[in-house]
Image (spheres, helix red, strand yellow):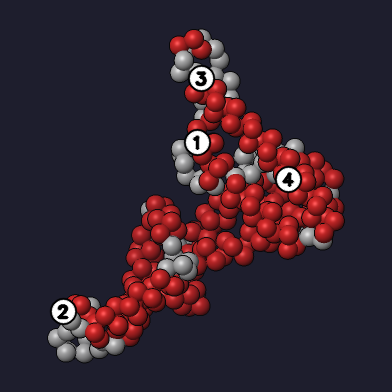
Amino acid sequence: MQDTIYTIPVTEVYEEPCECPLCALEARFENDRVNYYLGPSLMEPDNRIATNDKGFCGRHFNMMYATQTNRLGLGLILDTYMTEQIARMRKYAGEAPKDDGSGTKGLGKLFKAKSKGGQRSAEAICEYWHKHERGCCICEDLERTMERYIDVIFHLYFTQKDFRERFDGGLGYCMRHFELLCDKAGTMLSAGKQDEFLTALVRQQLDNLDRIQDEVNWFTKKFDYRNAQEPWKNSRDALPRGMRKMTGLRDIGS
């Protein structure tokens, strides 16, 4: 496999040990996509159609806002997204467009007392939104890209000795990405390779969970006056590392 936009990030992230290489890949890709949607994407009609249709989850809206680099661009995205979604909700409500001059704006009339029509409209809107809020342009991009990264990881693991050594000598993964690797191994690898890969992965994961648990344990023991003069070893940041390891939430302790 020649170096591609997928192999290069994978090989780079495994060059230095970290608590979860897939978290590092995920963070890099998310930041790139946030900058993309606030930059070049604004001028691409197809992407604006997609952002109006799907929008972004709360996490990725927050990431875009937190950059503070293009608030106008984010405002334009949010404006047309809200316009599209409000129009759809009015359609589900069976309500006239906002500017029809009927004098009944908003969703207030949906909730008039004893209004069966209002109840049906409310249910239709809530059912639509329940499905809609699961969508996010960046989340969908991320899911596709992470699958390609994992495909590259499997390929390199079985074809490049130096990569395999770095992989096997790593610090494991957060539990969310450990589960993802196990799941993808079950669908992407042959039975023989699957067993070989998962045997090594499980051993590595359990060993590194033990390592962090020991560090958390020592962190707690440092609060005992009898250990006040003992070194912290590698436990000063054990709490955020342990929580990130168990949950996959990268923002803990940052």
Query: What is the x, y in percent for residue 185?
Result: 73, 57
Please give the name of the residue rendered at 66% of the width and 61% of the height, measured from the top-left corner: 147
From the image, tell me which residue sits under label 1: 240
Q: Secondary structure at mark 1?
A: helix
Q: Nearer the viewer, mark 2 or mark 3?
A: 2
**Residue 35 pos. (x, y %):** 49, 58
Residue at 20 percent across and 77 percent down: it is 111
Query: Is tag 1's residue or tag 4's residue first in the polypeptide sequence?
Result: 4
Q: Amino acid at mark 1?
A: Pro
**Comes first in the chain, label 4 or label 3:** 4
123 lies left or right of 214: left
Density class for disc 4 (Cα within 10 Å; few <14, some 14-19, many ≥20) is: many
Residue 188 appears in which quarter of the rendering? bottom right
Q: Residue at the spot x=40%, y=59% of the render?
A: 58
Q: In the image, what residue type sits under mark 2?
A: Ala
Q: Circle 2 sits in a helix, a strand or a loop, which is it?
A: loop
Q: The residue tagged with tag 4: helix, strand or loop?
A: helix
User: Which residue is labeled 2 in the image?
Assistant: 113
3D distance between C-alphas at marks 1 and 2: 50 Å
| Marks 4,3: beta carbons within 8 A | no
Q: Which residue is mark 3?
A: 221
Side (left or right) of 63 relative to 103: right
Nearer the observer, disc 1 or disc 3? Answer: 3
